[in-house]
Amino acid sequence: MEDISKNTAPEEPRKLNFLEEIIENDLKEGKFKSIMTRFPPEPNGYLHLGHAKSICLNFGLAQKYGGKTNLRYDDTNPVKEDTEYVDSIKEDIKWLGFQWDKELYASDYFDQLYAWAEELIERGLAYVDDQTQEQIREGRGTIDTPGKESPYRNRSVEENLRLFREMRDGKYADGEKVLRAKIDMAHPNMMFRDPLLYRIKHASHHRTGDKWCIYPMYDFTHGQCDSIEHITHSICTLEFDVHRPLYDWFIETLGIYPSHQYEFARLNLTYTLMSKRKLLELVQKQIVAGWDDPRMPTLCGVRRRGFTPESLKMFCDKIGVSKRDQLMDIQLLEWCLRQDLNARSNRYMVVQDPLKVTITNWEKGKVEWFDCPLNPAEPDGAKRKVPFTGELYIEKADFMEDAPKKFFRLKPDGEVRLKYTYIIKCEEVVKDAEGNIVELRCTYDPTTRPGGSEEWRSVKGTIHWVSIDHAEEIELRQYDRLFTKANMNDIPEDMDYKDFLNPDSLTIGKGYAEPALTGDTSGIAVQFERTGYYFKDPDSKPGHAIFNKTVALKDSYKPES
């Protein structure tokens, strides 16, 4: 896999990707009057960041070229599927800002697919096989050796129809028989070596109940469903390129609408796994708190962490559409998130590692309220009121007793501006019996109030703070990457992916916030000034606010232009 970390497509002028070129050429030649795409998730788990790329691509192309997109659930495996996943998928698509034309299901077409299966049997192109799954696998041969024909391959049409109908009617147990296409057991493309069309599964389906006990395989479902819906451009990830010839074979053999499949490279992200099977294992083994754990790459997980749909769309646009697998740097995603939040998020002051400051020349009991901008980008915009008193908290890291020359925060006999307010000077350092600093006694300069009548006086350092009497204690959930290995797709065969779990992916602490924070109703992550972006967690309750760390405030990463 090619590692193209920090690589982004040029923005000006933006070149068409290969799918846009295909679509524009098809429309120019009059092949289609309008395009029709589809997003076909299997409802067996929650959508993840890889699906976001597919959603943005399918819906985005349809929007750009005046077409439509269907949401079609690939619900052919009742053992793994659930309405919980169906509902979550719709919620995620809407959250990203897209709306489908029709909500459809592969199960809508079970009767038609069954009829087509019988048609193939009648034409001598399908047969019922009694071999076990292992025998069928062994009989396929290898890339270098041809497969071996099943001993049941030459059953008569009448016998195959009878057996297939008995399969449908529930006469046989799971795995006892399958229906296979009769193509070519020596074909160089192993997909053509008599692929399975139907298997027996005695399980209730989330929509059809117990009507069926046989279910079509993916390759006998996907292309035909596209054809029924007149999908013009069936866009799949690269691993399905070997399926495309079989996709075309079924459509051509059945003589139905000629939908066509195109493949693009799936999203691979550093320090991230996007296997639904492995993500499900993390949930089932309670390694994470659920599908929406903010460490998970699921869309509900990143939403709970504070990611915005705008940032994900920006990221998908940045990485572009490729025909080669790529490992994208997660820092690009975080950069897109910062770009979006920096422009829109409200600012608040929160102290996480407090050191008490007493202003000795402040009038006892006096409270002064400052009107502070919610977003510095809009200085004349909305404000929040911040109380200033004689007892404050600052960050311990913002004071140093033996400070180096270029330390511009607070130090003995040094001055610093408390953001939005006055300049203070450290007059005394108070320590406990063990020599730990427990309090700073400072004076403030009343002439340094911003916007006052006095001449403006500058100091090199500005730090954030909160009033102790008005501060609200909040719970902080600090999230880091779930895995320690950059390329989780490149794990040695003798190792388990769980060996690379980061034991410090979640730490829980507390902070002291200015009172306006907990009343924020913006609906997006807020910036803790000088610290990072945080999002209010739905676990929050009155008197106990919880904030998830969304992303750090700064990073050395810069995308290439």
Image (spheres, helix red, strand yellow):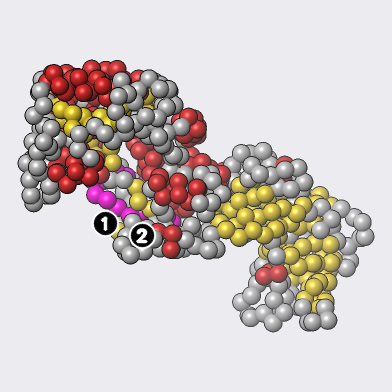
Which residue is denoted by mark 2 in the rendering? Answer: 487
Q: Earlier in the sequence, mark 1 or mark 2?
A: 1
Left or right, 261 with respect to 152, comes to right
Do the CB atoms of the residues marked 1 and 2 lie less than 8 Å apart? Answer: yes
Foreground residue among 259 and 403: 259
- Residue 300 location, x and y as percent? 51, 41
Give the crowd class for mark 2: few <14, some 14-19, many >=20 residues within 10 Å.
some
Q: Quadrant of the N terminus?
A: bottom left
Q: Which of the 4 image quadrants contains residue 432?
A: bottom right
Left/right of residue 109 with respect to residue 335 in the rendered view: left
Q: On the image, numbered disc 1 is attached to which residue?
A: 1
Tell me if residue 324 is in the magenta stretch: yes
Residue 86 or residue 369, whichever sits in front: 86
Q: Amino acid at mark 1?
A: Met
Return the mark for residue 349: none
Q: Residue 120, image x and y in percent?
A: 15, 22
Residue 489 is left or right of residue 24, and the answer is right
- The answer to whether residue 454 shows anywhere in this view is no
Q: Is residue 446 magenta?
A: no
Name above or below for residue 77 compared with residue 536. Answer: above
User: What residue sits 87% from the left and 53% below the top?
Assistant: 367
Looking at the picture, which amino acid does disc 2 mark?
Asn
Q: What is the magenta range?
A: 318-332
Which is nearer the eye, 109 or 232?
109
Tally the marks. 2
Looking at the image, residue 518 lies above or below residue 435: above
Residue at position x 68%, y 64% from top?
462
